[in-house]
Image: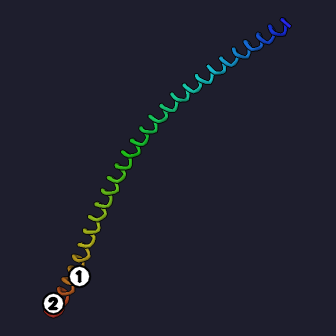
Amino acid sequence: MKKLVATMLMGMLVLTGCGQSEKAKLQNEIQSLEKEQKLLKEENKKLKDQRSKLDDQIRAAEDKIQQASSRNEETTDDKPAKDETDKTDKKEDASTQTNGQ
């Protein structure tokens, strides 16, 4: 009977010891996961800031492109009017030359 009690006590000590190391391992793993989570949150924040800056740069570039294209449209709108005036002037010159002869 004493041997049985001694064996049971030894078994409990072994199981308790194994449980402690498992518990310590789990605590260490939890801590490392928490650290990793913190680092990932910081990286995520940095990436969001970078994305925001890039979005602003894209908007600025799009605005510049739009302004440039509107300027080009304005200049091309002016050119046909000049061309039509030139054509009218040439026709008038041609008719005055034929009338003058």
Q: Amino acid at mark 2?
A: Thr
Identify the residue at image location x=55%, y=29%. Answer: 33
Between 36 and 7, the one nearer to me in the picture: 7
Count of residue discs: 2
Q: Tell me which corner region of the image, top left, top right, bottom left or bottom right, holds residue 99.
A: bottom left
Q: Quadrant of the N terminus?
A: top right
Between 47 and 34, the one nearer to me in the picture: 34
Q: Tell me which corner region of the image, top left, top right, bottom left or bottom right, holds residue 65.
A: bottom left
Q: Is residue 63 above or below residue 1?
A: below
Identify the residue at image location x=51%, y=33%. Answer: 37
The residues bearing labels 2 and 1 have C-alpha atoms spaced at a distance of 14 Å
What is the secondary structure assignment of the residue under circle 2?
Answer: helix
Left or right: residue 62 compared with residue 89: right
Report the coloring of the rendering: rainbow
Between 5 and 60, the one nearer to me in the picture: 5
Q: Tell me which corner region of the image, top left, top right, bottom left or bottom right, holds residue 28.
A: top right
The numbered disc on residue 74 is: none
Q: Quadrant of the C terminus?
A: bottom left
What is the secondary structure assignment of the residue under circle 1?
Answer: helix
Q: Position of residue 87 (x, y in %)?
A: 23, 82
Q: Is residue 66 above or below residue 11?
A: below
Q: Is residue 76 above or below residue 33?
A: below
Q: Position of residue 17 (x, y in %)?
A: 69, 14
Label 2 neighbour load within 10 Å: few <14, some 14-19, many 20+: few
Left or right: residue 84 compared with residue 59: left
Q: Amino acid at mark 1?
A: Lys
The residue labelled by disc 1 is 87
Q: Position of residue 27 (x, y in %)?
A: 59, 23
The residue labelled by disc 2 is 96
Identify the residue at image location x=48%, y=31%. Answer: 38
